Image: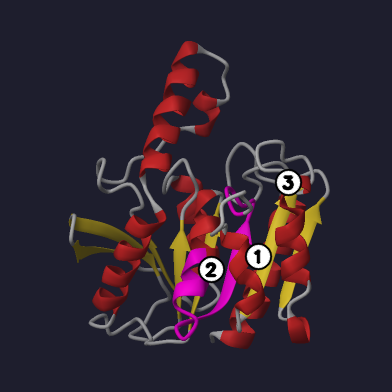
Amino acid sequence: MPEDMLSVPTPDGAMGAYVRRPEGDGPFPVIVYFHHGPGLDPGSKESMQRLANAGYYVVSPDRYHRDGAWLTFDPAVMRSGTPEGDALRKSMFSVLMATSDDMVETDLKALLTTLDNESAARAAPMGVIGFCIGARSVLRTIANHPDVFTAGVALHPSFCTTADADSPHLGVPSYSGHLYVGFGAEDKMQSAADNDDFIIATNAMSDGRGLAEIHDGADHGFAVPGGAYHDAAADRSYQKALEIFEKAVA
């Protein structure tokens, strides 16, 4: 299947946007893909291909482009317990925390403008999927663009339930589209227990439009091929994601 690289003009310079899509001219329904904290690594591209195989134009903006093009941080090294791993983890969190919701929103608006000129990308309705910190961006996106994004998927979410007055999970009850959320039962980094309010709000969405699940045996990062990948949890999550994309986007 084709893979493309778009150059997206933003107020902070050109941003790359990586595309996986089906063969042919399209237009194909669009899924915006917010990559996980370690960046758009090979596992993320494999995940994108899984969605493209189902007939979608999948596009991932370069979240950290202000700090360098397509930065990635190896999860295996960060988990190694070595000084090198500790330094890499510190570097990743520095870049991650410096990339604000407003920056991501600015980049998303620029991406949507660029997609207007991509003949293979269909106009709204669109879907959005995010992993780890990308799940936070999913919730911000569906709150900010309910007329564009009619289905959202948040997998092993990070920083979605906070003590802030504008915590991302607080927008879930007002969302008019479909939402699927998947947590790993073994996730100690961003546990399901710390996201009770988010889970409750999702499952309380009317007309069965929301579903939050906790996957037995799965850890943080279970849906991105790589070290923490969990076959059963990933398969279930992509199944549910494709179900709501088929219902609300295709």
Secondary structure under badge 3?
A: helix
Relative image position of residue 4 (x, y in whole percent)? 29, 65
Secondary structure under badge 2?
A: helix
Is 148 contained in the magenta span? Answer: yes
Q: Amino acid at mark 3?
A: Asp
Disc marking residue 194: 3
> Of 211 and 102, which appears nearest the observer?
102
Query: Is 138 rendered above or below residue 250?
Result: above
Query: Is 188 rendered above or below residue 106?
Result: above
In space, the residues marked 2 and 1 are separated at their CA atoms by: 8 Å
Circle 1: is it few (<14), some (14-19), or many (20+) Cα within 10 Å? some
Give the quadrant of residue 18.
Answer: bottom left
Relative image position of residue 11 (x, y in whole percent)? 18, 61
The residue pinned by badge 2 equals: 51
The segment highlighted magenta reads 140-160
**Disc 1 or disc 3, which is closer to the eye?**
3
The quarter of the picture where the C terminus appears is: bottom right
Q: Amino acid at mark 2?
A: Leu
Asked whether residue 211 is in view, the answer is yes
**Does 41 sit left or right of 139 as displayed?**
left
Circle 2: is it few (<14), some (14-19), or many (20+) Cα within 10 Å? many
The residue pinned by badge 1 equals: 238
- Residue that lies at the very extreme toward the right in this rendered image: 216
The residue lying at 81 percent from left, 43 percent from top is 217
**Does 247 sit left or right of 2 as displayed?**
right
Relative image position of residue 31 (x, y in whole percent)? 47, 73
The residue lying at 63 percent from left, 70 percent from top is 172
Give the quadrant of residue 118.
Answer: bottom left
In space, the residues marked 1 and 3 are separated at their CA atoms by: 23 Å
> Of 219 and 181, which appears nearest the observer?
181
Disc marking residue 54: none
In space, the residues marked 2 and 3 are separated at their CA atoms by: 29 Å
